[in-house]
Amino acid sequence: MKYDRPIWKVFNVVVVCAIIGFFVWLASHAPAGIGLVLCIPLFAWFASRALVHGGFGMFSWFSGSSIGGWQGTHYEFDNQKIRVEEHHDRLLFVAEDVLRATRIAPSPASWLAVHAEETTEIPGVKLPGFGMGQLERLVEMYPGTDAGRLLLWARREVVGPWEKKRERF
């Protein structure tokens, strides 16, 4: 949406500050500071708007931060964290975590730069990921690594329980 851009948020803050400043200036010219007392409801209304919208934004930010740290859906393979996101009835494994856990590339970022077409972008978090078919191709490409173990682990520990849980609902 056009008005979700940061520039519009800054513009809204500037407009609100200008309105408050105008009313404070107007109230300061009222006799004996009565105007400042009359501005209290205006300040309260603006503060409530900031708390409501700021609180909503804060909770949206928290819910969207599942990709960071140890929050969100993650599994552990060989003492390495693998983040997993669900998208359109399939699971996507964060490619960087998979490459680090299988030791396919010393630098996952450089491998991903060269092989970007072999990954799927995980919507919402904008990170490259692997589906199960892509993990199988990874095993074929790198047979001497831990990719085969990771594929078996993914089928047994991640996809199997996820499918059982999905069947119940």
Image: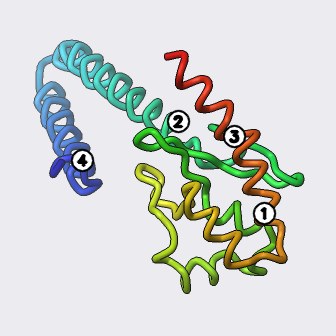
Amino acid identity at mark 4? Asp
CB atoms of marks 1 and 2 within 8 Å: no
- Eyeballing the image, is 95 above or below 74? below
The residue type indicated by label 3 comes to: Val
Q: Which residue is mark 1?
A: 148
Marks 4 and 2, how far apart at CA: 17 Å
Front residue (pair 43, 93): 93
Residue 87 lies left or right of residue 145; in this view the side is left
Q: Circle 1 sits in a helix, a strand or a loop, which is it?
A: helix
Relative side of 133 to 44, left or right: right
Between disc 3 and disc 2, whose residue precedes? Answer: 2
* Residue carrying label 4: 4
Q: Is residue 71 above or below residue 59?
A: below
Circle 3 residue: 158
In the visual, does 146 lie left or right of 61? right
Under circle 2, the secondary element is helix
Place residue 66 in its image quadrant.
top right
- Element at badge 3? helix
Kind of residue at badge 1: Gly
Cα separation between marks 1 and 2: 35 Å
The answer to whether 56 is drawn above or below residue 42 in the figure is: below
Crowd class of label 3 (few under 14; some 14 to 19; many from 20; radius 10 Å) = some
The tag earlier along the polypeptide, 1 or 2, is 2
| Residue matched to label 2 | 62
Amino acid type at mark 2: Phe
Q: Select label 1 or label 2 by which is in front.
A: 1
Q: CA distance from mark 3 to mark 2?
A: 24 Å
Mark nearest the camera among 1 and 4 is: 1
CA distance separating discs 3 and 1:
15 Å
